[in-house]
Image (cartoon, rainbow, N blue to C red):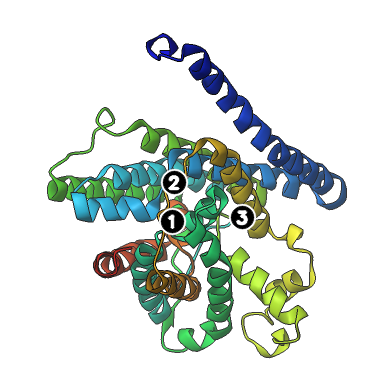
Amino acid sequence: MNTLVTSGGAARVDNDAAPSSAWAQRLPIALAVLALFGWLLWSVSARQALLLLVGVGLGWALAAARFGFTTGWRTLVERRDPSGVYGQIVLLALLAAISMPMLAHFPETHAALGPLSVSLLAGAFVFGLCMQIADGCGSGTLYKAGLGVPLNMAILPLFALGSFLGSVHLNGWLALGALEPVGLVQQWGAGGALAGTLIALGLVAVGVGAWSGQRFSFRSMPRRWLWGALALALFAALNLFIAGQPWGVVYGFGLWAAKAATALGAFDAAHNAFWSDPGHAQRLQQTLLLDVTSITNIGILAGALWVAPRRPQDARPLTGPQWLIGLAAGFIMGYSSRLAFGCNVGAMVSGISTGSLHGWVWVPMAFLGTLIGIRVRRRFGL
């Protein structure tokens, strides 16, 4: 290719320098991850050290494949391109096929169960709306922040604050009406739950194909959605096996803000129903590095940072009003994600793949919100 360029020597130097420059930028990230891995292994636990690497893998897969849950839904609505949604269906099917038998055979593993509640309905709807305005769900905010997208970097602390406030108010929302969580693996066994989940996913794929005019086909799907789904399913399954709980994002955000508010003397956990729970109260007292969700979130940021040198930043400048709308959406997204017991990861991916009925309620409510969020996004030129 260089022989077609007039200044062949200069072009060759530039092409050779680009990879070395990228590796030079990645070296500090690799050393930092290696140092943190070694410290966790020595001072904390092998489990937390391994979960850091799982998080790095998740961040790498999200960023390298640009596996955007928000974008996948938006391209389906705006362009009738179902590729992203099909990729998510593949992810759910693969992960369910691994997770459900694991839950049945290893009693120390737990499903991502959430109650069927008013807070779930309201939270999922508002979350779906706001994620389109903010251009990223929980995982999307993390990996895009790692890629250096300015809006998502600014949204990250606001998302954490919103998630914390949502947890503070959660008990009041649940008082409006809530039913006990329903776990399909517990109700039907691993085989029945997996069969029911795969049938439901198949019906969704048929419906998406009928609406978009493009039937599901492995051959016609962009490769990034397929290998991204495979990589995310494998790393998410490792998360369940190592941590004993499914992949989540939102709880870690809320915990970060809760610890900050407690340290500043602005919050008394003893007087709050959520944070006075023994498990949550213990995490408030411990280092963040002992929290499963926090350590994988840190890993996701590192994994996205690893991809960043070879991934051009596609963010465009925003006006002042666009910044305000985006930041407000990020804060509300954090609040609503706590009410909905998770985002696209914790509620949809982990919920459905581990047999929680609340995941199947979350999806249509969030999609309804997305339909409005896309209109708002278009209205303000976001």
Give amino acid for label 1.
Gly
Marks 3/2 in contact by CB < 8 Å: the verdict is no
Q: Which residue is tagged 1? A: 355
The location of residue 290, given as percent across then percent down, is: 75, 59
Question: Which quadrant of the figure has residue 126?
Answer: bottom left
Name the N-terminal-most of marks 3 and 1: 3
139 to 320, vertically: above or below: above
Total numbered badges shown on the rendered structure: 3
Res. 186 visible in picture: yes
Name the N-terminal-most of marks 3 and 2: 2
Q: Residue at x 18, y 39 (%)?
A: 215
Q: CA distance from mark 2 to mark 1?
A: 8 Å
Residue at the outermost top position: 3
Badge 1 density bin: few <14, some 14–19, many ≥20, Cα 10 Å:
many
274 to 152, vertically: above or below: below
Name the N-terminal-most of marks 2 and 1: 2
Label 1: state its secondary structure: loop
Label 2: state its secondary structure: helix
Q: CA distance from mark 3 to mark 2?
A: 22 Å
Q: Which residue is tagged 2? A: 96
Check residue 221 in the rendering and tell me which mark sits there, or answer none: none
The location of residue 253, given as percent across then percent down, is: 60, 66
Image quadrant holding the N terminus, namely: top left
Q: Residue at x 78, y 46 (%)?
A: 36
Check residue 297 in the rendering and tell me which mark sits there, or answer none: 3
Q: CA distance from mark 3 to mark 1?
A: 23 Å
Give amino acid for label 3.
Asn
Label 3: state its secondary structure: helix
